[in-house]
Amino acid sequence: MSGAGKARIVVGMSGGVDSAVAALLLVEAGHEVHGLYMSNWDDEDRYCSNAQDYQDARATARELGIVLHRVSFETEYREQVFAPFLAEYRRGRTPNPDVLCNRQIKFGACLHYARRLGAACFATGHYAQLRQGASGPELLRGADGGKDQSYFLCGVERAQFAQVLFPVGALSKPEVRARAQRAGLPVFNKPDSTGICFIGERPFTEFLSGYLPETPGPIETTDGRRLGTHRGLPFYTLGQRGGLEIGGVSGGSGDPWYVARKDPARNALVVVAARDRAEVASAGLRTGVVNWLADAPRAPFIAGVKTRYRQSDQGARVAPQADGTVRIDFDTPQWAVTPGQTAAIYAAERCLGGGVIEETL
């Protein structure tokens, strides 16, 4: 934060404790702080917390004595995040809208809006860290390994980080809550939000069925034995165990079944018994064009790779391709590598970038 000077800093305030403490720390550092509450989804039902979140952000802003602005990016979100999200599901893939939201909305439209408000920097409550390297800003993991959000930031354009601050990135979640409580912030014990932002706590299949039709097809084993009927490939994800409704069919073994792959050409969902999951693990993957947060490499190199948020780094050989994509070969075959998800690439604590998984190997 020292590099920003005593400047006007706009903080993206979600109504949660993380962004509240981000604003608190900046106020304590003597900056001119403005809050910015953005709404991206216009549905008001029992699953949507927009109204309460805004009131919580207002209460925090009052306690801190700062101005709170409010802006809607609902149109941008539907066009740039939700439409691609649905398009991916129609293809039978499983996208990660949070990665796209960070790139297009939070550090795209929202950052641009903060600049219009005269901000020298835009701050958020993400658990990540930034440092200035020889060739530009470098993205690092948050100090709290259990809350680190660098995975979700790997798609943000590197240049955008030059005007970004992550004030809570060096803190643990308990430290953040303690700081909020000591400062008398009303959200100090507010539960963390979970799930995809526009879905909230509602059942995912229920939400998706409002936008995509059911297209039933066979559930099969890897050797072609039919076990049942699925609702439609978009309603399942690789590695999924629950919701298959074939629990009693297991050749007498009693093993649960897991989704191993999708076959869009035949509209078939292929499953595997738990004991056989290693047989369908992926040796590697290919990505789409990678968003590099370091100087783009030309030669293959060894790195840690995460193919989903809660995964630990997996050792791999990363081979850049001439078209901007990469081929990744894992040291150990990986279960449930999912096209449409994001592969984030790490060198120790630094996130080097990431790309959408296009196919498994």
Image: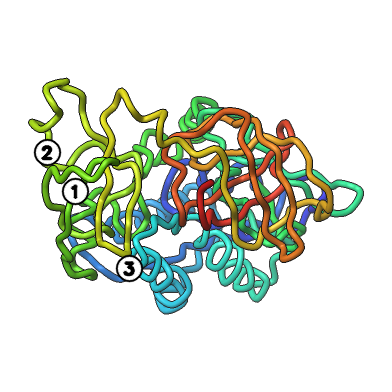
Where in the figure is residue 169, as x and y percent of width and height? 63, 38
Q: Is residue 5 visible?
A: no
Which residue occupies the extreme right position in the image?
134
Identify residue type, mark 2: Ile
Where, by quadrant of the figure, is residue 116 drawn?
Answer: bottom right
SS at badge 1: strand
How far across and down, in percent of the image, does residue 295 sit? Answer: 83, 54
Looking at the rendered structure, the kind of residue marked 1 is Ile
**Disc 3 on helix, strand or loop?**
helix
Identify the residue at image location x=36%, y=30%. Answer: 277
Residue carrying label 1: 219
Query: Which callout, 1 or 3, points to the residue nearer the camera?
Result: 1
Which residue carries the number 2 mark? 246
Q: Is residue 219 above or below residue 317?
A: below
Q: Earlier in the sequence, mark 1 or mark 2?
A: 1
Query: In the image, residue 91 lies at what x, y percent?
Result: 37, 66
Image mark for residue 143: none
In the rendered structure, which amino acid carries the disc numbered 3?
Arg
* Residues under numbered marks 1 and 2 in contact, where contact means CB atoms less than 8 Å apart: yes
Write down the residue under mark 3. 90
